[in-house]
Image (spheres, rainbow, N blue to C red):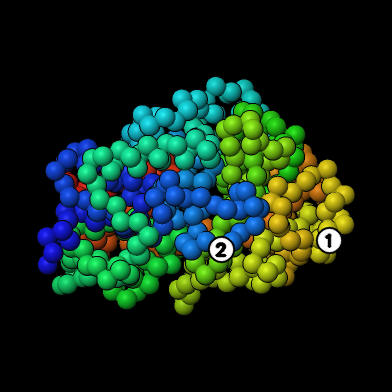
Amino acid sequence: MNPGSQFDVIIIGAGPSGIFCAYELIRQRPDLKILMIEKGRPIEKRTCPKRTTKVCVGCKPCSITTGFAGAGAFSDGKLSLSPDVGGHLPEILGYEKAAELIKESDDIYLKFGADTGVYGVDKQKEIQEIRRKAIKANLKLIECPIRHLGTEEGYKIYTRLQEHLLSCGIRMEFNTMVTDIVIEENQAKAVVTDKGETYCAPQIVAAIGREGSDWFSHICKSHGIETEVGTVDIGVRVEVRDEVMEFLNKNLYEAKLVYYTPTFDDKVRTFCTNPSGEVATEYYENGLAVVNGHAYKSQEYKTNNTNFALLVSKNFTKPFKTPIEYGKHIARLSNMLCDGKILVQTFGDFQRGRRTTEERLCRNNLIPTLKDAVPGDLSLVLPHRIMVDIKEMLLALDKVTPGIASDETLLYGVEVKFYSNKVVVNTDFETSVRGLRAIGDGASVTRGLQQASANGISAARSILWPTAD
């Protein structure tokens, strides 16, 4: 074995969970040999041509979803500072421990340049009014202070983190795909890459993010790593004029509202609100297009619209085993109808069961921020049950902030969150294979930047000082 191929810890994936795991490991033990393997590019080479050309050229891998900092590099960059939002750390570690880790990871973001301002802590009278309206509409308001990095500022923060890790001697292999994990006698031993390299380490951390969740589910299946059928979140991205969301945006920045629909009792939630932001396309393996949204801190890039996701959470029973593939199947249907682009429909047409046309789209006060979205009919893509859930949620939201259920409100489809491969882990985040940990969104442990970052810190400490039996 080449001595240069032996490490103390190998981290697969350079998203927030992997970054913060590496950060804490090298902070505690500067002598450790750590390797990070990332199938995307280093952050300074992550550029999306569509931002200037407005046309996707099909970069492989996609720079929006892969590379150092993962999808977080170009996300809106909202850090949820409450354990109640963003993942399952409180269930695994306990509420107080999760809160401590979130505070620690937040301090690191501040150290590397995050804005010190926090939304949702100094507007109690206004928040009380929002909560009152939510209760009347049978919505649950989840209070969560938010630190907003902003898309362009988040990029700078992660750039500084990459430079810091490299300066500490952490080795990073970019444009490199892990094709397999070597497991012998139920112990993780090494990883194999698409470049024919084998790297060995007694501790391997799968921090693969949503982009890698499907890959990791196949790894788990081929090696018999214990998993559970997780939740799949499917829905749409809603876009309205800023005026409609002004009170919520001003006082909460991101209003996290949960609704259990009257017809099917399904859970629907708001997610990733982007005041004065823009709707964007994310591309996954094989060019699969799903919708997302961003917001910038700089006035230069602000729009007149607010966008947010409405996600329907679906849990399945046996014999169903493939929630990720189910989500991808729905996304493919939308791509098929729109030639690989995102579908857009007005809420008026959505309710009336008719296809949106270019002509009707042009009548609106609302100008779509995703310029290449294709007017169409979401009923040809989404199951009836999810259509009903979305309609009922929008009508409930209209009681909190009137205008959301306007005919001109835009619905972009589809939005799917690929974190449904729920890997069974202990309190050290170790899987059923010794020495193999699974963390972050791709393992369905977390569902957002802050808990993913906190998860990385916790996993690092569990490597250094194991606690689980």
Q: Residue at x 27, y 71 (%)?
A: 196
Write down the residue under mark 2: 58
Q: SS for tag 2?
A: loop
Cα separation between marks 1 and 2: 27 Å
Q: Write down the quadrant of residue 140 in the picture.
A: top right
Q: Earlier in the sequence, mark 1 or mark 2?
A: 2
> Is residue 90 in view from this perspective?
no
In the figure, 131 relative to 388: above or below? above
Viewer-closest of 135 and 436: 436
Amino acid type assigned to the residue bearing label 2 in the image: Gly
The local crowd at label 2, few if under 14, some if 14 to 19, many if 20 or more residues have their Cα within 10 Å, is some
In the figure, 322 relative to 425: above or below? below
> Is residue 431 in view from this perspective?
yes
Q: Quadrant of the C terminus?
A: bottom left
Q: SS for tag 1?
A: loop
Viewer-closest of 325 and 82: 325
Q: Quadrant of the N terminus?
A: bottom left
Judge from the rendering whether residue 405 lies leftward or rightward of residue 166; answer left or right: right
